[in-house]
Amino acid sequence: MSETTESTFKAIETQEELDNIVKERLKREREATNKRYEGWISPSDHQKALEETNQTLEEYKKARETDSQTIEDLTAKNTAYETASLKSRIAHEVGLSHEWIGRISGEDEQSIRADAESLKKLVGNGAPLPTKNPESGETLDPSKTAFKSVLSAIKND
């Protein structure tokens, strides 16, 4: 038995031989480990994927903030239009002329109606503005009518 042991065992005599043996064993271990973890993600790939996900999340958050601001702006505009429409309708129902609509205040229908009625009591019926010239039948624009009356007064002088 000692003969077979001696024939298979070879003593390491130099550092170079030891280095070669260690390199070979390390190579086999790396290959086995790589085979064992094949298909798994590496730490550097994981970090890259995490950074990409975080970047996508930040872009989504910015888009959501922009969308939220747009929704708030549109909601405010819609509320303003609804209030203006309500004031116009109530002014018409109460009998106020169009020029007084801007003077009506209130946030809900009840307060707007109360303000319109109190304004109506203050200003009275008032004469509605003419929309057509009875002589020529043309539509009157109040700003142009004032200029025309000034011009005719200048011509008559």
Image: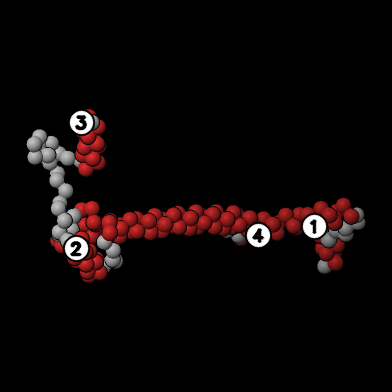
Disc 2 versus disc 3: nearer the observer: 3
The N terminus - image quarter: bottom right
Disc 4: which residue: 33
Q: Nearer the viewer, mark 3 or mark 4?
A: 3
Tell me, yes or no, if residue 144 can be seen here: no
Which mark is drawn over residue 50? none
Q: CA distance from mark 2 to mark 3?
A: 39 Å
Residue 97's image quarter?
A: bottom left
Q: Quadrant of residue 72?
A: bottom left
| For residue 84, side relative to residue 35 (left or right) | left
Tell me, yes or no, whether the two marked residues, 3 and 1, touch with CB atoms within 8 Å: no
Taking the view exactly as shown, the residue that stands out farthest to the front is 157
Residue at position x 34%, y 59% in the image: 76
Mark number, residue 22: 1
Circle 1: residue type: Val
- Of pointers 4 and 1, the one earlier in the residue sequence: 1
Three-letter amino acid code at disc 2? Lys
Mark 2 or mark 1, earlier in chain: 1
Q: Residues within 10 Å of mark 4 (few under 14, many from 20)?
A: few
State the residue position of label 2: 120
